[in-house]
Amino acid sequence: MVLAAGLGKRMRPITSTIPKPLVEIRGKALIDYGLDALARNGVETAVVNVHYLADLMQAHLRRRKDLAIVVSDEREALLESGGGVVKALPMLGPDPFFLINSDTFWIDGYRDNLDLMTDLWDPARMDLLLLIADMRQATGYDGRGDFNMDVEGRLSRVGERDMSPYIYAGAAILKPELFAGMATEKFSLNRIFDRSIEADRLYGARLDGLWLTVGTPGAIAEAEATFLASASASAA
């Protein structure tokens, strides 16, 4: 599933006329970086939720021919990340699935990061596996970190007065049963993350490469510069 229903308020004025997932970096819409990663890893069907300027999103998604796109329509009510997944569950099926944010993406290092996550995924120990970037691998981020990570990859929350180098990089593998019995209503995935932490079943996979988040218009130039620097380093 690709989360693409947000309003993109911090990206205004660009998002006055297009939804944030269609903002381009190096001539490619943000959402296509995530869809490309899914297609490279053998995903045949992707569920994409839409809300803001949904007609433009659907027109763009119809151009994809390498994987089937199923739209989860949230025009009537924006459900946030958690509620959006609950609404889409009937389309996702009973097996663990990838979940990707449409406004964050990464430049793979030596490993394809979704392939790396698949290798690390262990349903006997985990209910949720998050792709985790170190701040030194990131552009466009100015927070205090999202999680602490132990030597086995188990995640816990950062204290209110603490900092951590570890950031949620916008990709996950998760079990649909995490949402069992939950109503289709507005709520954040953080509720699911916290439940998994309480059960000691939230883990992280260290990102191989560089992580980019494009939250404001000013972050576009930084992301494009990072791409150019990465390409130059690879060619050297």
Image: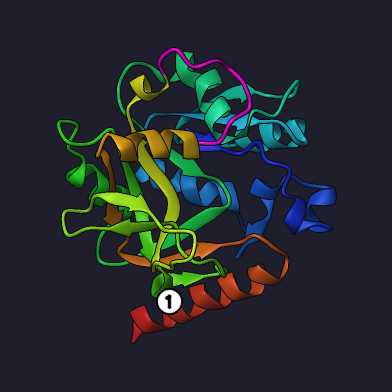
Question: Which residue is rendered at x = 41% and y = 46% of the image?
Answer: 171
Q: In the rendered image, is residue 42 in sight?
A: no
Q: How many marks?
A: 1
Query: Which amino acid is tagged 1?
Result: Ala
Q: Quadrant of residue 96?
A: top left
Per the rendered image, the range of residues in magenta is 180-189
Question: Which residue is rendered at x = 17% and y = 60% of the image?
Answer: 151
Residue lying at the far front of the rendered structure:
161
Q: Is residue 161 above or below residue 39?
A: below
Question: Does the segment drawn in magenta span residue 214?
Answer: no
In the figure, is residue 107 to the left or right of 14?
left
Between 28 and 85, the residue placed more toward the observer is 85
Q: Quadrant of residue 164?
A: bottom left
Callout 1 secondary element: helix
Main SS, magenta region, reads: loop
Question: Which residue is rendered at x = 28% and y = 32% of the image?
Answer: 127
Residue under numbered circle 1: 231
Question: Does the segment drawn in magenta span residue 184?
Answer: yes
Residue 123, horizontal then vertical, whole percent: 19, 31
Q: Is residue 82 above or below residue 105?
A: above
Q: In the rendered image, is residue 13 in sight?
A: yes
Residue 30, horizontal then vertical, whole percent: 59, 52
Residue 199, horizontal then vertical, whole percent: 27, 34
Residue 212, horizontal then vertical, whole percent: 51, 64
Specify the color scheme. rainbow
Label 1 CA crowd tier, 10 Å (few <14, some 14–19, many 20+): few
Q: Quadrant of the C terminus?
A: bottom left
Question: Which residue is rendered at x = 45% and y = 32% of the image?
Answer: 67
